[in-house]
Image (cartoon, helix red, strand yellow):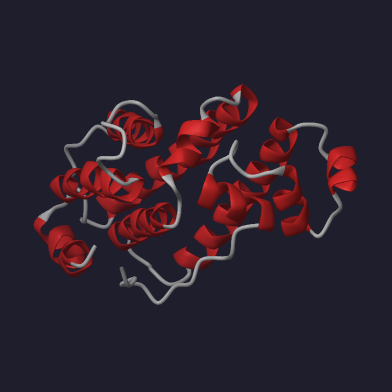
Amino acid sequence: MPTIFPFVASAFSPSMAVFRRKGVNAPTDAELAAALGLTPTALAAQYPDRAALLLHSLRTDLERQKQDHVRLYAQFLSAVERLYALINYTIEDLIVTDIVYLTDLAQFPAAWQLVQDHLATYSTPQLHQLLNEGILQGLFRSDINIRLVTIILIQQVNIAITPGLFPAGSFQAAEIFRSIFLYYIRGLCTEQGARLAAEHFARM
């Protein structure tokens, strides 16, 4: 699926690329060591178990996303375009992510908590600010409750990434994310905002 935005996301770290492609549990230590340019012995010395490597890889990946968001914001000035760009960025991230990665991720408490902390301390303020800016720009409806809508959006993220809520093998993570978010966001827009978002929406 080609992107509609002239934006290229930063590459995953070598270990995260393996996890995203095959899940957390399936890759062998030898496979992960080779991806990182280490011997299995050096991998074990640096990361005593799979949970430690996952946590390190996830922290690195969340920082990658934050840096990408800064670059993405530089290309879009309006809150509506930025929000749709963020959604598209996440969709494309999930397109190259096997659903088994999300299923496995939930089995590692520290990593799963890191995701929840990221949603609370980074994504929540980010969405709150975009909604507020969009209202001031006349692009989002002025009668929305920003705090409530922000909570709803964060819960929608949790729905999209929580394993077991959808029949196994029936839907890709990107398809779930797209279906949850795009229609809801369009409903928040004013007529002006909807016109600005129309091209983005139609091609996502």
Q: Nearer the viewer, residue 75 or 160?
A: 160
Q: Quadrant of residue 126?
A: top left
- Above or below, 45 against 86 in this view is above
133 or 94, which is in the foreground?
A: 94
> For the image shown, how many numbered marks are present on the structure?
0
Q: Residue furthest left?
A: 191
x and y, in percent, of residue 127 in the image: 39, 43
Determine the image quadrant of residue 164: top left
Q: Position of residue 163 (x, y in %)?
A: 39, 29
135 or 23: nearer the viewer: 23
**Would you say 74 lies left or right of 200 here?**
right
As drawn, the residue found furthest toward the bottom would be: 6
Q: Quadrant of residue 204?
A: bottom left
The image shows residue 89, relative to residue 16, as above or below, that is below
Which residue does the image show at 67% across and 58% down from the upper left?
Answer: 14
- Report x, y in % for residue 165: 30, 26
Decide: is 161 above or below 173.
above
Q: Residue at x 21, y 56 (%)?
A: 139
Q: Residue at x 44, y 57 (%)?
A: 96
Quarter of the figure that contains the N terminus: bottom left
In the picture shown, does residue 67 fall above or below 112? below
- In the picture, measured across the screen, residue 139 lies left or right of residue 61, that is left
Instruction: Name which residue lies at 20% across and 36% down.
Output: 144
Q: Percent position (x, y) of residue 36?
A: 76, 56
